[in-house]
Amino acid sequence: MKSLPFVVTIIVGLVCLPLTVPAWDGFDASTTGLVEIIPGNLPSRGDTVDVRSYDDDTTQTYLVENVTQNARTVEVVVRSTNGGARMLVMEGH
């Protein structure tokens, strides 16, 4: 019974932890605006990702068309539902 306050404290602490979704930082090759891809893992062709643009603080869903890994970066070409394509240069994974 002496450990009950400790257990309650641990449970409350775990419940109150902020839930964060890992993101992957980079920039838009045409505008050089900072972006992040959510989720933060390396996408494959055909995957759907959310791209957050820091310049205008918006998030849009894209379809991944191509992924090219270079020595220090990963180039991800994405296309929106209206047909607009973007090349995102992301930190190497």
Image (cartoon, rainbow, N blue to C red):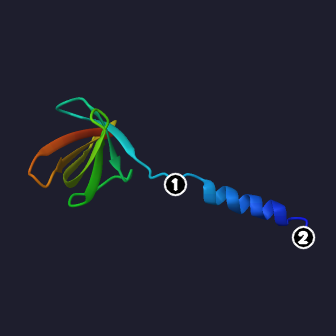
Residue extending farthest to the left is 83
Vertical placement of residue 83 versus 26, above or below: below
Q: Residues within 10 Å of mark 1 (few under 14, many from 20)?
A: few
Using the image as rendered, state which of residue 17 and residue 40 is in the foreground. 17
Vertical placement of residue 14 versus 55, above or below: below
Q: Which residue is mark 1?
A: 19
Q: Earlier in the sequence, mark 1 or mark 2?
A: 2
Q: Residues within 10 Å of mark 2 (few under 14, many from 20)?
A: few
Residue at 30% x, 55% y is 43
Residue at 28% x, 54% y is 49
**Mark 2 is on which residue type?**
Met
Q: Is residue 93 visible?
A: no
Q: Quadrant of the C terminus?
A: top left
Q: How many numbered marks, from 0 up?
A: 2
Residue at 75% x, 58% y is 9
Where's residue 6, x and y in %? 81, 60
Vertical placement of residue 43 versus 30, above or below: below
Q: Is residue 24 left or right of residue 50?
A: right
Where's residue 14, x and y in %? 65, 58
User: Which circle marks residue 38 in the picture?
Assistant: none
Using the image as rendered, state which of residue 25 and residue 13 is in the foreground. 13
Q: Is residue 43 visible?
A: yes
Using the image as rendered, state which of residue 85 and residue 20 is in the foreground. 20
Element at label 1: loop
**Mark 1 is on which residue type?**
Leu
Where's residue 62, x and y in %? 21, 53
Q: Which residue is mark 2?
A: 1
Residue extending farthest to the top is 32
Where's residue 65, x and y in %? 17, 53
Residue extending farthest to the bottom is 1
